[in-house]
Image (tube, grey):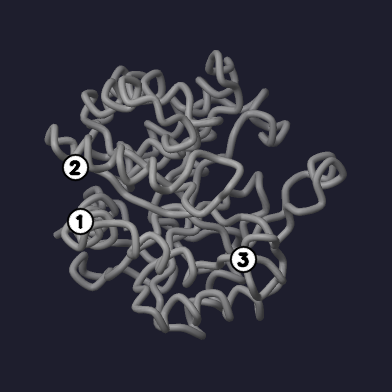
Amino acid sequence: MPVIRTVLGDIAPESLGVTLCHEHLFTNPPKWAQDKDPDMVLDRVDAAIGEVTDFDSLGGGALVEMTTADYGRRGDGLLAVARATPVHIISASGYQKGIYYPESVATESVEEIAARFAADVTAGVDGTSARAGVIKFGTCRTDEIRADERKVQKAVARAHLETGAPISTHCQAGTLGDLQANGFADLGVDPDHVLIGHLDRNLDYDYLRKVAKTGVWLGFDHWTKPKYPSDDLRVDHIRRLADEGFTKIMVSGDLGRPSYQPHHGGTPGFAGLLKQIRDRLPADIAERVFVQNPRTFFAFTPREGVA
């Protein structure tokens, strides 16, 4: 029977509710990255609880927390937030992207990396009882997928096939989504279990259509950010895709910086993000991208013999 795996346990898909498909509550990238950009660290449990509580007050039901081990994932923090609020929290296994990989990627086999990812799903992350409900893969370039990333992609595919947990990706500046999608297909992954992220960083309609035709899900997850294409353009592209029958779309803000979260002194926060997207989308499309699509995509049947 399909379930959605939250940090507090498995739930029925229909219990998920309004969902943001790609967010961050805790981040702690390598020191070299923080030295270049100090607006990268989210480390306060009280602030994370406040953000999620605000989201709940506007009808938010679930948040997919996409921080991985190489970017500072905190299983204990995710459990604290989930226990303090009614919102379902889904944690991510996998790795962020090549520039953040641990040194072990160079020496470990695909099988060893995959076993670690699978254990996140079946046993728990960061030495806690919080099990991951999605596996992340990311690329850090806009022109090619690095060799070490291809190695991790093989491990992510293997862990997915072993556990059933869906795959969600990071595309640098929205690029290489078609290569990611085709790479997973070549590794035996059904495109219905792959969400290609950050595609709204690259709002070239022909490119989006090309990615959509592979059968994967499309992540429009950079709403409300003035430095990127406008939200009005996002709405236009979502409408055009829907008119052609490409409705496998989910939305979020990827608000992984203190400057994006009010309880850290920023804006708009998850509540503000939810309101702004709802205000722009027609009601039927909002219901699809916030509720219907996430409960379909994030649901999986754990493989036989795998807890």
- The crowding category of the residue bearing disc 2, from other C-alpha atoms within 10 Å (few below 14, some 14 to 19, many at least 20), is some
x and y percentages locating residue 214 in the rendered image: 24, 24
Residue depicted at 37% across the width and 43% down the height: 234
Three-letter residue code for mark 1: Arg
Q: Nearer the viewer, residue 241 or 48?
A: 241
Real-space CA distance between mark 3 and mark 1, rounded to the nearest whole angstrom:
26 Å
x and y percentages locating residue 58 in the rendered image: 39, 79
x and y percentages locating residue 212 in the rendered image: 25, 29
Three-letter residue code for mark 3: Thr
Looking at the rendered structure, which numbered label has been put on residue 267?
3
Real-space CA distance between mark 2 and mark 3, rounded to the nearest whole angstrom:
29 Å
State which tag comes first along the sequence, 3 or 1. Answer: 3
Q: Is residue 59 visible?
A: yes
Image vertical order of residue 79 relative to residue 251, above or below: below
- Residue 228 picture quarter: top right
x and y percentages locating residue 9 in the rendered image: 36, 71
The residue pinned by badge 1 equals 288
Asked if labels 1 and 2 touch by Cβ distance under 8 angstroms, the answer is yes
Three-letter residue code for mark 2: Thr
- Residue 261 picture quarter: bottom right
Residue depicted at 33% across the width and 48% down the height: 165
The residue pinned by badge 2 equals 247
Quadrant for the C terminus, please. bottom left
- The crowding category of the residue bearing disc 1, from other C-alpha atoms within 10 Å (few below 14, some 14 to 19, many at least 20), is some
Which is more foreground, mark 2 or mark 3?
3
Image vertical order of residue 121 relative to residue 271, above or below: above
Real-space CA distance between mark 2 and mark 1, rounded to the nearest whole angstrom:
8 Å
Which is more foreground, mark 3 or mark 1?
3
Residue depicted at 52% across the width and 28% down the height: 152
Does residue 301 appear left or right of residue 263 in this picture?
A: left
